[in-house]
Amino acid sequence: MDYEMPAEVLEFRKQVQDFITSHRTPELEAELAEHHIHGYGPASQAFMQAMAREGLAAVSWPEEYGGQGKGALFLWTLAEECAREGVPFDNLTFISVGPMIMRNGTEEQKQEILPKVLRGEMNFALGYTEPNAGTDLASMQTRATRDGDEWVINGQKIYTSSAHLATHVWLAARTEPEAPKHRGISTFVLPLNTPGITVRPLWVMGEGRTNETFWEDVRIPADSLIGEENRGWYIVSGALDLERVAIGTYRPLEKTVSDMVEHIKAERPELADDAFARNAVADALMRVEVARALATNNAAMVHSGLIPTMEASMGKIWTTDSRERVNDAFMDLLGRSGGMQAENGDAPLDGALDAAWRGAPVGRFGGGTNDIQRRIIANRGLGLPR
Amino acid sequence: MDLRLSELQELLRANAQEFFEREVTFERIREIEAADTPDTQLWEQMVQLGWTSLPIAEQYGGQGGTLLDTSILVNEACRVALPSPFTSTLIGAAAVQAHGSEDVKNSLLPRLADGVAISSAVLESDDAIYGDPQTTSDGSTVSGEKRFVEFGATSDVHLVTATRNGSQGIAVVSRDQAGVELSPVQTIGAIPQVHVRYDGAAVEGWIEGAEAVDGLRDLGTALTAFEAYAYAQKALDLTVEYVQLRVQFGQPLGAFQAVQMRCADMATIVEGSRFLANELLWKLDQGEATRRDVAMVKAITSKMAPQVLQDCHMLHGGIGYMQEYDLHFFTRRGKEASLRWGSAREAMNVVVDTAFA
């Protein structure tokens, strides 16, 4: 057993921090500040493209696809640092969709798609959820019908986040309506500017926007299909496991807690002697530590060539539940000031508590609700009967 | 970074598991609890297997294993709920090895490797693990009272934290002498314990420095946190097994979502604790653990273990409440581990004080 974070990973962390510092332009800051009003814009897109061009994002990808083959600890470090600093990182493309294309695409598809992803010229929105297929994702109804050399897509997706920014969509659609629901789904990659796709914004309670997308006779070439026809559910499941590792990043929570400690020391020193406040701060620090343990465990497993399933769900549950509870407790400690928003200028923690509390639900339901994660742990991890 | 057991560690684990499962039945545990004293025959067997010499450096007659290596044995002993001075001796041995003078190490470590047992006498009130020792030494003798000394009645040597000429240190004291007066105390974990009055007891060695006292405290706290994890893990394993066997309403309990979700939550915090308890021992092996690191893991495991253990009981229903069933051994030991070497309250105070410092 060796718990040492390799020196090379620590150097890479430094490299990421330097990249963030040098690419944090006034335009990007302004755009991120308005994020909850307008969503990510061109400056965010430029930031992510620069990161891809710099080779940071592909550091863990195999060398044959233009990466450096360095293992999962590096990619995880990148995701953690970006999350901590609140800068955009296209983690779904690099952690979830990219690796699933590597595993399931044809050589031709991989050579076509992956280098573009690495150059920051191609990235993905996820087309999974539908109005009637949320937690029960496998009951999705959007159809992809084969017509000669093309697939024709009709239907509706919802929570298609980034569809207004991304170049492409990673789409799951029903290709065999007569088969059992898990066995009639396939996965596709196609450009979002294909005729027939309409993107409509949905504004969220937390920060930014998501979308609903309408698909009307969208025609794409036959080779847009990734993996075997009708086996898409299993590809989506693998992608979701990887996505949960990404959602379980702990460093934003760590930053909130250390910022709160500094705030108390500087502005509210009487709370350092208040028994309830001390208990809340201790609980928060302990939650961060458990979140760090579960996240590091996941990264180490992927790094060792293992695939976390139960463990990915554990990290996701713990971190997102903690984000809600810790931010809630901290707002309570500060009383009315706890609800002050960033616009005020003098809001405690620059309004981070308000933003994180409003944003807490997406962590707890995104990637599958935490209660569904508990069932994954019970069934797939502990072996309890379905 | 690779969190898997090495091949040698896995071999050690499998051997220990096989030994404990063969030798330590729950009937034997009941006899040990009734006698309120450790089983000397088992101790001899563990010495013969080389386990007491594992953490001792080779130059003192040991095998040069790490804390992390030795914790594999602690884990397996916890998994059969064995009340054994193995952990208290490991704590003492590691402290002597890290902080003792050459004289103290040469006189004590070879004996420890050969099976001499140690108890650590640290507490002077019920819960003041971080206070300055009030017990005093004049160099040749030590006087004062220590409370809740695990295996204090049977260990050959006591490590007694004390103050000498205004500076802290640890007195090495033979138990079997006139100036050492023992009074047994019964606690929830049924680990044999005594309060000890040292009345001019002869000192055979002195380990100088607050650093040594802090080091002893870190080792005791970290290994006890590890034990709290180990008991909770074992109780959870028993519970996951039980809910698959027990049928009610025509299906296994484990098929009910409410039961599944409770098990999932327990597994999550136990998994986090497993990582942290092991990582802490690794940090101690590297000499990198801070007081805050130690207190943090103790706080987490002290909060976690009692909640998990009580939830395991609820899922077992009546059978788990019966003395003739085995779950209660882990429950009581795990709860006691959460109180020993600093309860959650004390550990959390260290965590918060460090943050606000």
Image (tube, coloured by chain):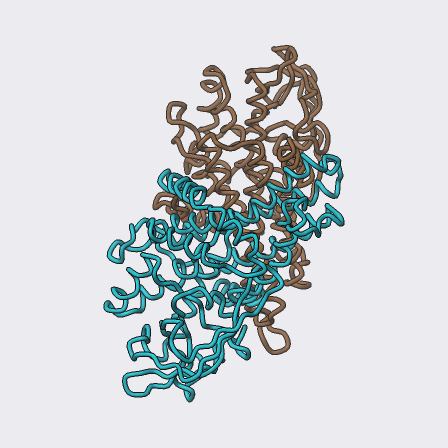
Chain colours: A cyan, B brown
Q: Residue furthest front?
A: A27
Q: Is residue B160 above or below residue B350?
A: above
Q: Nearer the viewer, residue B227 or B272?
A: B272
Q: Nearer the viewer, residue A297 or B86?
A: A297
Q: Eyeballing the image, is B143 above or below A322?
A: above
Q: Which quadrant: the N terminus of chain A?
A: top left
Q: Residue at x 28, y 55 (%)?
A: A62
Q: In the figure, is residue A152 to the left or right of A43? A: left
Instruction: Out of B185 and A313, give the one closest to the viewer.
Output: A313
- Residue A385: horizontal and vertical position, in percent? 52, 71
Q: Is residue B116 above or below residue A342?
A: above
Q: Is residue B152 left or right of residue A333?
A: left
Front one among B103 and A215: A215
| Residue B65 seen in this snapshot | yes
Query: What residue lies at 48% left-to-right and 16% top-to-bottom?
Result: B101
Q: Quadrant of residue B179?
A: top right
Q: Is residue A117 above or below residue B71?
A: below
What is the count of numbered marks? 0
Residue B58 location, x and y as percent? 37, 27
Residue A108: image location, x then y, percent: 23, 69
Q: Is residue B76 visible?
A: no
How far from the left and from the top, in percent, is residue A209?
Answer: 55, 64
* Drawn side of residue A276 relative to residue A2, left or right: right
Q: Residue at x 28, y 76 (%)?
A: A223
